[in-house]
Image (spheres, helix red, strand yellow):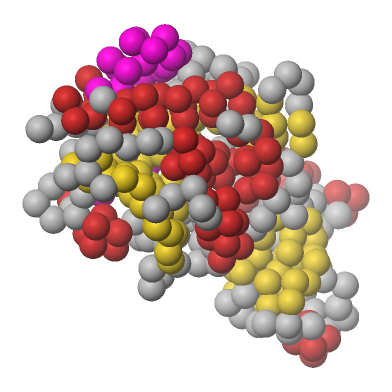
Amino acid sequence: MNVGDTLKKFLSVHGISGLEDNVATLMKKELKGKVKKIYEDKVGNVISVKGSGKLKVLLTAHMDEVGLVVSDIGNDGFIRFAPVGGVDPKILPSRQVKIHTEKGVVNGVIATKTVHVQKKEELEKAYEIKDLFIDVGADDKKSVEKLGINIGDFIEFSEKFIDLHGRRISGRCLDNRVGCTVLTEVMKSINPRNLTVYGVGTVQEEIGLKGARGPMFGIDSDVIVSIDVEISGDTPFLKDEHIPLKLDRGPVIGIRDSSYTIDKRLKKLFLDAAKKYKIPYQLGVSTAGTTESTLAILTKDGKPGALIGVPVRYMHSTVEVVDLNDIENTVKLVVKALGNINKYFR
């Protein structure tokens, strides 16, 4: 298992919500020949299957990332945009972007009024999206349209990943290519006994947990486990009592968030596995945001659900940071726990 190589492959492709094709293609390529069956459903979710036991476990990890969409093209050739998912406007100025058009990809930069001519009150306030625009080098609207750019085209951040000290990596879309990496490595590694495991790379999570709903209803599994990232609080301006999770302390067993509470049997399953196999772990309680694990109890007659997370710094930025040790230990925890799951669900 080389999670670093797998993660870097996933970080090298783009996949904004609604345009996850490249991530889906990569996941299918990585799992080809390693699973019993793999296919894409009608909306683009990638579904892999391993094992043939009676108990059915569904694992999800969303493939999409946050980004932007073209909302207007000015007569002056500058492009206005809207957010796709939870984008922080403060990180946007000076970003390089790629606009996906029917003719191909067009490069651009996000800009605003130069610092030299800003008034004092402008310098002191945080940017809003209405204060920003994209420059693709065109002089007028007609030139922009000749490039193939239209309202509704998706815009993705261009930043590439970098290696930091030790085993840490920084880049855009670790949320949730980290989860894709874990899901892929789990499906490669697991050898299910008396168990059928469905690994689902989902679409459109960042815009309302949309993609996972179909497979959760259609597969009708007995258990649902979502694999996502969790906010790491080991940085300046964050206090332990608010966000105690840290890098290199192990996977996060999500206890609850604003919309979800872990099933008590799954909580015991993952805690027992962590202790038995000496896998470091952290317990996560959040009051903000949620993940696909929220959907488990809402599926059909209700499904036991759990969130297993990997701590990540600076989420929804272009410089998110993860520790590869946490990814490796998350893979181990999920594989070991599923090896014993029949004892908890009879």
On screen, residue 107 above or below 183? below
Between 26 and 315, the one lying in front of the other is 26
Any part of residue 202 in sight: no
Q: Relative to the observer, which residue lies in front, 206 or 166?
A: 166
Q: Residue at x 54, y 29 (%)?
A: 327
Q: Is residue 336 left or right of residue 33?
A: left
- Find the residue positioned furthest to the right: 116
Side (left or right) of 85 relative to 10 = left
The answer to whether residue 215 is seen in the rendering is yes
What's the residue at 63%, 41% (across, down)? 6
In the rendered image, the quadrant that contains the C terminus is top left
Relative to residue 66, is residue 131 drawn left or right?
A: right
What x and y, as percent, mark residue 235?
61, 20
Residue under the image location 16 percent in, 26 percent down: 344
Toward the viewer: 217 or 120? Answer: 217
Q: In this picture, which residue range is highlighted in magenta? A: 269-296
- Residue 256 in percent (x, y) is at 28, 30
Q: Which residue is rendered at x = 56% and y = 45% of the image?
A: 177
Residue 41 magenta-highlighted:
no
Q: Is residue 294 magenta?
A: yes
Q: Is residue 279 left or right of residue 95?
A: left
The N terminus - image quarter: top right
Residue 167, x across and y down, in percent = 69, 22
